[in-house]
Amino acid sequence: MEALRASDPRRIGPYEVLGRLGAGGMGEVYLAEVRGGPRLAVKVVRSEHAQDRTFRARFRQEVRAAQTIGGAGTYTARVMDADTEAERPWMATEFVDGPNLRDAVLDHGALPERAVLLLAGAFGEALAAIHAKGMVHRDLKPSNILLAADGPRVIDFGIVRALEATALTNTGAVVGSVGYVSPEQIRNGAQVGPPSDVFSLGAVLAYAAAGREPFGEGQDSVILLRILTRDFDLSGVPEGLRGLVESCLRDDPADRPTPAEVVEAAGHTARSLRKAMGPGWIRAEPEAAPEPGDDARWVPEPESGERPSRVEYVAPVTVPDAPAPVTDHLVTMTGPAAPARSSSSRRALLRALAGGAALAAVGGGVGGWLWLREPDPGKGGAASGASGGRGSASPSGSAGKAVRASILWRAATGKPSDTLGPCAALAPDGGTVYVAGADGSLRALATDGTQRWRLTLSNAEYGSVSSPAVSSDGTVFVAVGPQQENGGSGRLVAVGAAGRSRWTKDLPGNYGYEGPVTAGDLVLAGYGDPLGSTGGLRAYDTTGRTVWTQPMGGGPDVAALVVGKVVYVGGYDNYLHAFALADGHELWRTRLDSDVARPAVAGNTIAVGSNDQNGYYLYGLGTDGRRTWKKEGRGGGYTSYTTAVGSVFLAVNGTRLMATGSDGTALWTYRGNAPVTDPVTRDGTVYLRCGTELHALDTKGALRWKLEVGDGGDAQSSPVLAGDRLYMAASDGLIAVRLST
């Protein structure tokens, strides 16, 4: 990290800038933090891109998709926050303390064969996750890969696609990095889909294994010609890796392996990768298990200064991303077993790195790698404590407080859908739990976790399935995002209790849809196009008949809220709208400063979050739509949900849960050491996921207890309460927790 220059910002949105991490063709990168929160890497877009309106719209869309990728147990750095409306747009990702692959090879030479195979497996998993969201990285290169203590991380996915929309490239161009672009990125009019990333992965693996560029050095035009003519040098790649690298570098995209096949060819599975990605993973041989009481960890040496990115180049225009093939998930069930516990020492390690823990060099092993020892428990320092808030202690309790919850069962139904909103919905009699999967399915589970049925609703992974909603007659509704093969429109699907589709309605627009909302005999679904001015809200009855349609200046970005006879919905048009539930006529609309999130209502006050170029805000409005107050730093941004608990409003922003009174008074802030979900409340207790734990707070923000529940994967959904049970998303399905009274 470098010291800040005179021209560098001292504050970006709500974050205090601590130092300068680097720069590239997209913009500058800074280390920043919110007081008491984790450190983040914040990338600020260059002013020439920021002035292009089309870039902003595409950047907004790509950042939102990127926010659903990554997190604990993955090999991608999660996008934690962003402001696409700032004077210079920015996005904040998890801070990964470690060198990028390019610098590691320049400083220490080629990586051992074992480490390259681990990289291949990890990158295969990372690309599969990125492609599953309908995204293509487009700029996979050594400088976009960070080497952390617990494994590598891919960064900057989704950014290059935004650059393709700028005035710079509107004449027919995309952006890539010389030496790592695929042949189809160079050829005019060719399709760039997931196989393009696999080609780039092959070049990256060749660089890591041989310590030199596979297509050599020289003028850009010469390197591009070598790519088109397959003139690469793999003489330095070990024999055990050459077959995998060559298969990735095949000229025909259809002949390249899929990311899943790359993982298999590397000799790994998801389980074996997790087991191998521990201390010393980058060494030639696995590190021997430490002696009892020895908590030393291997970590790469951080960069000592800024290094510019490799030269970027402008290539001919390409067509939009192609969806990745659907892989069916095997449904397995687990009984009421103890949760799989994530390694708290790794989380503590990364916090120690972010906090500047001392490093001491030792001999042996790969030159240039250092030891780090975590602070002793109870002696303070950034590494003490497990993930959670306010001095959390053990994973099973807090400060000796009894945990009033236990895990009933885990249903391994596959990776959950990544949309916002509740993680599940219940039948009117409470006897069936409905969950949506990232594989495009809707599943029905019995209350003991066994599967009753599964219905596939999307054959393309680009078409995500929203959180379900259930009407009083037992019909289940989900919104299915747009799929390229049906022209870009989404669908509202009604499913009967027996698992058969009853009817389907097309929803205009070309972006992912949040969950529908049921109200009496109506179901409400939003639609729209964030790149244009179309959008609105549509009401159907349970037979599929359109009851009313209310256009808006921009599509709603979150689900509608129904309170009594009024529907509240915010959207890309910067307005909060109030519609009559019965016929949809507009009661009022109030303009805010940017895109409008999902509001909450408490008495005669409406609270809603938004953000502009200056920060995040929570607005207070009367039920007549008149603005009464605006509080900086209390809102969760335009994709957030605000929750009402009595006369108190709760909003989530990253790792913080903030409570604000109905008059705008800041009441308290709960700070976690991991991102928190939107909360649910009952009987004076607030429940939310924080990293791998379920936290229970009192109404003053004090931690009552916490329970280790395991990795939630990419899921951002909120828990669901039903009687004495609480349902939560897991990385591979759904968890049922029994709450004790």
Image (cartoon, grey):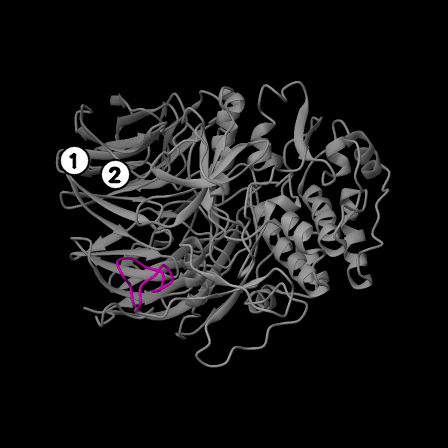
Measure the alpha-carbon separation of dots 1 and 2: 9 Å
- Note whether residue 459 is visible: no
For the point 82% across and 62% down, which residue is it? 239
Q: In this view, does 566 lie to the left or right of 184?
A: left
Q: Mark 2 points at which residue?
A: 634
Amino acid type at circle 1 is Gly
Few, some or many residues within 10 Å of mark 2 (<14, 14–19, 20+): many
> Does residue 66 lie above or below 474 as drawn?
above
Mark 1 in CB contact with mark 2 (< 8 angstroms): yes
Amino acid type at circle 2 is Arg
Q: Is residue 331 left or right of residue 353?
A: right
Q: Mark 1 points at which residue?
A: 664
Q: Position of residue 501 (x, y in %)?
A: 48, 47
- Note whether residue 250 is visible: yes
Q: Which of 166 and 490 is in front in this view?
A: 166
Mark drawn on residue 653: none
| Residues in magenta, as a range | 379-393
